Image: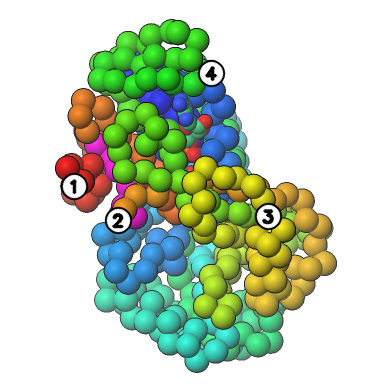
Amino acid sequence: MDVIVGGGVAGLSVAWRLARSGRPVTVVDPAPASGASHAAAGMLAPASETDYTEESLLRLGVESLRLWPSFAAELAADAAPAGDWAAMLDYRTEGTLDVGFDADDLAALDELASFMDKLGLPVERLTGRQCRRLEPMLAPSVRGGIHAPQDAWVDPRKVTAALLRALGRRGGRLVRARAEQVRPGAVLTEGGEVVEAERVVLAAGAWSGGLADVPVRPVKGQILRLRSPRPLLSRCVRGLVHGRPVYLVPRGDGELVVGATQEELGFDTTVTAGGVYELLRDARELVPGVTELELAESVAGLRPGTPDNLPLIGPHRGLTLATGHHRGGVLLAPLTAAIVLGEASEPAALCSPERFL
Ligand code: FAD
């Protein structure tokens, strides 16, 4: 049996794929799907979420984006056989529009577009007017942008709900308890239960560093959910506002996600007035109409950061790691599962935890 410690998008994806392949699987988590995966915006946008020094991360993201359509379709089929899979996960494929306001922003976007060109990723350079033609609610001060048509996004809360359901239907077991100790071959829960395993997969996100000697730290992200009677945007919009990145992710039901701060404050998850103010201020620069919307939710999540921003996936001191996904755990979920199942050897080399030994 395999035991997965942590039931966020990473752990649940691994658990479901293992169960689907016929392995007996147990997930140990006191509150599945309550961590970073609950806060996440759900962008599947490898290039926009990467900078030019992160070519390995970009390659992983591109590979995982390629896996997403079949992963999503199979997940939905397992979770609710008769449903429309795209609607079930709010899986959308209209791409990302990255916009800028001044010459510095446009130069940065041009550099990103050249980087994408170099890697053979589709990208279109647009004038301000062309950006507004795609998204009429954009501010008149937007001077230009780039469109990444291959990007997609999902609602991570729907994805984790589907993963839990699909895992159950495939015979996976869920133990709602905190893991106190994790060691090769066994997990000790807070209730004193020893869950024995052939393989222990550590997928406890930002908390992984408290359970094993792994270089994972929490990176706080505050994020907002606004509600609108009708969708304000038809694709993900990202922008640099005086050098500060902000993004807007539309959901099918009119929700608009505004994210996200990036703060090194340990395990603090306080939503601050300053964080909410900065996100709304910058979002309004991109799309002035956001101030009319209802503020439905503000939340902070902890990204599992690593020293080189690459995830830690693979064997490590008798355990198997599936953690350290930082800003891209939703995007990287299908690839993470594929690596743990031994189905992706080239990406596996980039994610090997042994790089820190
Ligand atoms: P988590 O989702 O944090 O799950 C960890 C799980 O471990 C939790 O359920 C927790 O209860 C459990 N756990 C903790 N301790 C224990 C223990 N001792 N025993 C048992 N279980 C334990 N990524 C994208 O790809 N696209 C995005 O647009 C995006 N936006 C984001 C926006 C924000 C504001 C944030 C914070 C993150 C965002 N991310 C995004 C990153 C993404 O959310 C993470 O990389 C991903 O959720 C990590 O998944 P995980 O399963 O490793 O961790």
**Mark sitting on residue 272:** 3
Q: Residues within 10 Å of mark 3 (few under 14, many from 20)?
A: few
**Callout 3 touching callout 1 (CB < 8 Å):** no
Where's residue 271, x and y in %? 67, 50
Q: Are marks 3 and 2 in contact (CB under 8 Å)?
A: no
Do the residues under discs 2 and 1 have CB atoms within 8 angstroms? yes
The Cα atoms of the two marked residues, 4 and 3, are separated by 30 Å
- Say whether disc 3 or disc 1 marks the residue closer to the N-terminus: 3
| Residue type at numbered disc 4 | Arg
Determine which residue is flagged by label 1.
355
Q: Which residue is mark 2?
A: 308
Instruction: Give the amino acid type for the residue marked by disc 3 in the picture.
Output: Thr
- Residue 318 in the image: state x and y as whole percent: 21, 25
- Neighbourhood count class around disc 4 (C-alpha, 10 Å): few under 14, some 14–19, many 20 upward: some
Magenta-colored span: 308-315
Alpha-carbon neighbours of circle 1 within 10 Å: few (<14), some, or many (≥20)? few
Residue 75 magenta: no
* Alpha carbon separation for disc pair 4 and 1: 33 Å
Which-is-in-front pick, marks 4 and 3?
Answer: 3
Mark 4 and mark 2: Cα distance apart in space: 32 Å
Q: Could you tell me which residue is drawn at 21 percent across and 46 percent down?
A: 356
What percent of the width, then of the height, locates residue 313? 28, 40
Residue placed under numbered mark 4 in the picture: 176
- Res. 121 image quadrant: bottom left
Q: Could you say which disc has been placed on residue 213 in the image?
A: none
Is 310 magenta? The answer is yes
Regarding residue 12, the answer to whether it shows in the image is no
